[in-house]
Image (cartoon, grey):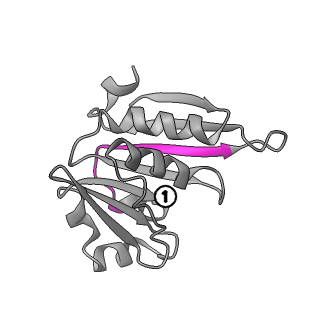
Amino acid sequence: MIDFEYISHSENDTMNFAKNLASKIKPGDVIVLNGDLGSGKTKFTEGFLEFFGLESEISSPTFTIVNEYNTNDINIFHFDVYRLSSSDEFYAIGGEDYFSSGICIIEWGNIIKDALPKDYIEISFSKSDIDENYRVLSVHTYGQKYDYLFS
């Protein structure tokens, strides 16, 4: 279990942090993104996908719950579970099956916390009231699988 903070001063900083993390993530890994609307979750995902050459592919999965991206034999599943009322709805769509099928990025993952695997990375995004570009990305790892990434 590791706690780490990253300070972002721009959308590019957030995207670069995501690209760097993407370079170390493998199929079967899960990243949970939490934070207010407009706090940087989608920019993070955009940067993450850019590492895989998918920057022109991103679209918000708000109404479809999950978007699937494929590259180099890697599946990336981008969830937005904001509209789910509980983990039961996540289980109903077979959500847990995605965990072993590729890389999962889950926005608003705190809604389905009890459905998440034992090992995952959670990144919480906080905005500043003073500087509209300033973000604090608080990273917390669950389990020990990801400790090496932030130590």
Quadrant in the picture for the C terminus: top left
The residue lying at 64 percent from left, 36 percent from top is 136
Dot 1: within a 10 Å radius of its alpha carbon, few (fewer than 14), some, or many (20 or more) residues? many
Name the element at disc 1: helix
Left or right: 48, with 28 as reference point: right
Q: Amino acid at mark 1?
A: Asn
The residue lying at 51 percent from left, 41 percent from top is 15
Quadrant in the picture for the N terminus: top left
Left or right: 150, with 74 as reference point: right
Where is residue 74? Give x, y as percent. 19, 52
Where is residue 13? Give x, y as percent. 58, 34
The verdict on residue 123 being magenta is yes
The residue lying at 42 percent from left, 28 percent from top is 2
Q: To which residue does mark 1 refer? A: 110
Where is residue 71? Give x, y as percent. 23, 53
Where is residue 49? Give x, y as percent. 38, 49
> Which residue occupies the extreme left position in the image?
73
> Which residue occupies the extreme right position in the image?
130
Q: Is residue 146 above or below residue 29?
A: above
Count of all numbered marks drawn on residues in the image? 1
Left or right: 102, with 112 as reference point: left
The verdict on residue 73 being magenta is no
Nearest the viewer among 125 and 58 is 58
Left or right: 34, with 31 as reference point: right
The picture quadrant where one finds residue 130 is top right
Q: Is residue 119 above or below residue 13?
A: below
* The residue stretch that appears in magenta: 115-126
Q: Is residue 60 above or below residue 11?
A: below
